[in-house]
Amino acid sequence: MKVEKLEGTCLSYYLPDVKLLIDAGAYTDKPVKTLILTHCHCDHFTYAAKIIEEQNPKVFVGRKDVKALVEMGEKIVPEFAVNLTPIIAEGLKEGDVVEGLRVFETPGHTEGSVCLLKNGFLFSGDTLFDKGVGRWDLPSGDYVKLMESLERLKSIPYKFLMPGH
Ligand SMILES: [Zn+2]
């Protein structure tokens, strides 16, 4: 499976075989049929509005971040104020499969954070990094839930970790 890493306000990943983009912290003009956001934070959807406007992909986010994603887009965040706009996304739940990516609900960094697994690649958003874990002190963050989610990730048989930063 080909995975292209895009660097921007977060690390985003493009899967050319299925024309799928995971997070939109960087702009791409490659064909995007599906956009999955790992959670509702603005550094992960900086370029989502532009890509949606240009390509009209299906857009997904964890079901518990659907509302927060809209609200985040309405806020003015000077640091990432690149076309921020409320993003309307369909909610993902545990066990959903999108273009071969299996969805794991991993609350803690945000209530609706998800990790995605395909062919041994685990796209972990801001839940798990190479060194360390995501913050739990932002709105809807929860330390206990994050620890539980990290414990769960240990049982997932992934080979390559693809974190959001
Ligand atoms: Zn985040």
Image: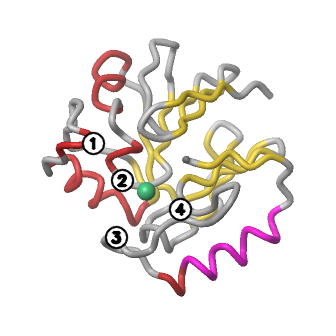
Q: Which residue is mark 2?
A: 41
For marks 1 and 3 on the same chain, the one whose residue lies earlier in the sequence: 1
For marks 2 and 1 on the same chain, the one whose residue lies earlier in the sequence: 2
Give the amino acid at mark 3: Leu
Within 8 Å of ligand 1, the CB of disc 2? yes
Side (left or right) of 159 relative to 161: right
Q: Nearer the viewer, residue 123 or 6?
A: 6
For marks 2 and 3 on the same chain, the one whose residue lies earlier in the sequence: 2
Within 8 Å of ligand 1, the CB of disc 3? yes
Q: Which residue is mark 1?
A: 87
Q: Residue at x 19, y 39 (%)?
A: 85
Side (left or right) of 137 relative to 92: left
In the picture, the quarter occupied by the N terminus is: top right
Q: Which residue is mark 4?
A: 93
Q: Residue at x 27, y 42 (%)?
A: 87
Q: CA distance from mark 1 to mark 3?
A: 19 Å
Give the amino acid at mark 1: Ile
Image: 115 above or below 82? below
Residue 30 image offset from top left, x and y in percent:
52, 13
Q: Which mark is residue 99?
A: none
Q: Which residue is mark 3?
A: 138
Q: Residue at x 55, y 47 (%)?
A: 165
Q: Secondary structure at mark 4?
A: loop
Q: CA distance from mark 2 to mark 4?
A: 18 Å
| Region in magenta | 146-156
Q: Secondary structure at mark 1?
A: loop
